Image: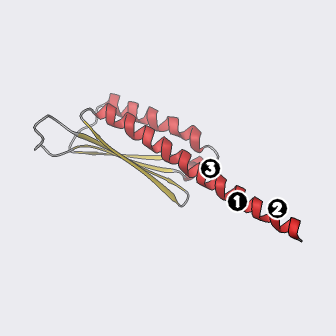
Amino acid sequence: MNINIKATNITLPGSIREYLEKKIKSIEKLVKDNDVDLIKVDVELGRLTNHHRSGDIFRAEVNLQIGQNLLRAVCEESELSAAIDIVKDEIVKEIKRLKDRLRTKIIGGARKIKTEKKSA
């Protein structure tokens, strides 16, 4: 799994980088059916502009490419670790949704073949 981390308008401390890598590595077990080396993860963490009155707003964005499928999750929160947690949960939902769609296509194809055999 290739992980690219980009920081925008902030410097990432080592603890946040380790926390992020731990969360991304937990996704790896969900995509173990595919070749793990072909999976590309682009993560962008950043602090939005300074015009917010209520303090800093952090943004976490994950783009996960599995073969030809691109999954994306974005979150804006007041704390960077909270944004990372939410975006991880969203990308897990996207992975499960993709797996369900692929499984449905396989079952539909098998059902079609089965009905063709019965009619022949």
Q: Amino acid at mark 3?
A: Asn
Q: Position of residue 65 (x, y in %)?
A: 49, 54
Query: Disc 1 to disc 2, how far (Cα)?
Result: 10 Å
Q: Position of residue 22 (x, y in %)?
A: 45, 32
- Residue at disc 1, secondary structure: helix
Q: Residues within 10 Å of mark 3 (few under 14, many from 20)?
A: few
Q: Is residue 93 above or below residue 118?
A: above
Query: Disc 1 to disc 3, how far (Cα)?
Result: 21 Å
Judging by the rendered image, the residue that carries numbered circle 3 is 34
Q: Residues within 10 Å of mark 2 (few under 14, many from 20)?
A: few
Q: Position of residue 98 (x, y in %)?
A: 55, 51
Judging by the rendered image, the residue that carries numbered circle 1 is 108
Q: Position of residue 43 (x, y in %)?
A: 38, 46
Residue 47 — which label? none
Please state if 24 lies on the left or on the right of 78 as rendered: right
Q: Amino acid at mark 1?
A: Gly
Q: Residues within 10 Å of mark 1 (few under 14, many from 20)?
A: few
- Residue at disc 3, secondary structure: loop
| Figure quadrant of residue 113 | bottom right
Residue at figure coordinates x 62%, y 55% from the top left: 102
Residue 114 — which label? 2
